Image (cartoon, rainbow, N blue to C red):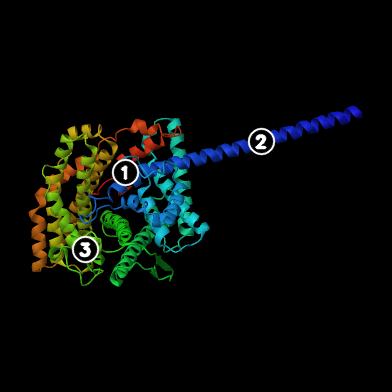
Amino acid sequence: MENDAGDREGTDAAEIGHDALASLSTLETDLSRSAMAGSICSQYFNLFIDISDSFLSQCLVQGSMPPPYKFGVAAYDTLSASAQLSACIERAERWVSTCWHGSLSRAALTASPSPCIFRAVSVLDALLSPTPGASRDASITEAYKWVAIATAAQLAIHKEGEAGNVDGVGAQSQLRGVALVSWQKAKELVFRNIAATGSFRLALSLVFFGDIIPPNSSTIEEDKEDRAFAFCEGIKRLRALCLQTRSDIEAQKDVGSTPRSTSFNTTSGGKRYHIPNLPPEANQLILELVGALEWLVSLYNTIAIGTSYGKICPFPLEAEDDEPTISSGMESPASSNIIDDDTLSPLLAWRCPQEIENSIVARVQQGGSSFIEFWKNNVHESEAVLYAGRLFVSLSILLWRSLARFTIGAAAVDTGNAKYSDIDRDYTAMIDLIELWRTHFGKVDLHTKLCLQQSDREVWRMSAFCSVDTDFAILLFYNVAQRLEKRLVQLPSVPAKERLSSSIRSTRARRSTQRLAFSDEINNPSTPPDAKHASEMTLGLNTCLRGLLGLRDNLFMAPGTAQVNN
């Protein structure tokens, strides 16, 4: 009996020990999975910063933006040095640090990738938005983080046909799983925080989330609707927040030189937007950040209009044209020296879109040789080449804006509300911009593509955006023009319609020739440089390499739109 008892005790002890080891093993497995998941999420967020944020930041600094801007998103560097704003800056940096585990030093934009746009919206939230509480703040930041991860996860997916073996198929399946889970998580967090109408971070999260193509799932149609709603809502919110910030800073200026604290409604929801006491130089830097976000809104809005043939239109461009100037008694730049006055941001005075667009055209026309020739002669001067490239980014954005106007005008023909003279004007303006682009940017031939592979990565991305995305806008324009030409033949003859038809017919041969050239440039993009180095940043999944290849195979600003239908 004693032996039996001893045996049972030994067996029980062994079972307890086995259970303990099993529990320990499970705990270690869970911890390992958690650590691996956290590390993978960090890698994807880093990929988003490296590919999306850092590139978009180059589109939102001096050169890429209209001439009055001196800083754009780079204004954060100067603003963050203000002792008066130290508490707000620390708050913004805490939000950034929960997502970004890289260096928190604010180096120059070209020095190393960093979350420049995320910092911009974070500091605006810290300075201006209602204080929702620590838990809501954390949730909004988490929403932005998962939107970034979902964006990068989509870029990391190879095309299905490129999986050459069983291991490749398995890896592809794993990547698609990550893309689906991260998209669902991003969706849940974005809509959970939808009531945060005064948050710049949430508004930008909505825009970026709406720019992601939903992964295939059982709820794909619902997901597409959610994506479209998020995109349009984010664009409208971000635009409204920027306009309201401008309005309040203008109100401070009208009172006098003494800074004051004011507040106003952010949305119809009735929440209050608080403007703290700030010196004029700080207000001007805030306006630089706001202007950068407005330029981003304009870019996304016009690309959405152009790529959807007018079916998606968060807000029409005439809303910008009809927008009253903030200071009604202020003279235009042509009749005053207000642009040279450093005490006031010219962006408060210069609100006419046509004047801004004319200034961009004039700036490009002042250049000497084409960008391609300039780059070839200064291939080792990355900063000089980047600045020259930024000038053409602004012209590229101008082309997208012009395309959006023409697309909306052409779509009105089918509704019976067409203004033929306006469409004719927009058509001619687009033709002139294309000629300006081809003359001053230059042609990207095979030799140029080979040289670009040896360039600094930022230079490659700038050039790729300028050539590929702009070529795509031009091809879309040719498609709309071709459709419009066929439609006009079916309509009753009126003088204005006949003049428009004549304008389109007169350029038909040139459009056909250029269409072939632009299509060739899109179909044969240059390979991204340093792809091998990028893959070394990953956990064996080649995430960054896949991301760079995905970026090459998709348009920079219009993911999922790989070709133009004939």
Q: Which mark is residue 179?
A: none
Please, what is the three-letter code of the amino acid marked with disc 3? Trp
Q: Which residue is mark 3?
A: 350
Residue 375, quarter of picture: top left
Inspect this view and state whether residue 5 appears. Answer: yes
Which residue lies at the image location 38% right of the left edge and 37% below the top edge?
A: 544
Q: Please rate how many residues cluster around mark 2, counting C-alpha atoms within 10 Å: few if below 14, some from 14 to 19, many from 20.
A: few
Mark 1 and mark 3: Cα distance apart in space: 28 Å
The residues tagged by marks 2 and 3 sit, at their Cα atoms, a distance apart of: 66 Å
Query: In this rendering, which labeled residue sits more in front, label 1 or label 2?
Result: 1
* Discs 1, 2 touching: Cβ within 8 Å: no
Q: Is residue 497 left or right of residue 184?
A: left
Q: Which dot marks residue 108?
A: 1
Q: Residue furthest top?
A: 3
Q: Nearer the viewer, residue 74 or 451?
A: 74
Q: Position of residue 134 (x, y in %)?
A: 51, 57
Residue 224 appears in view: no
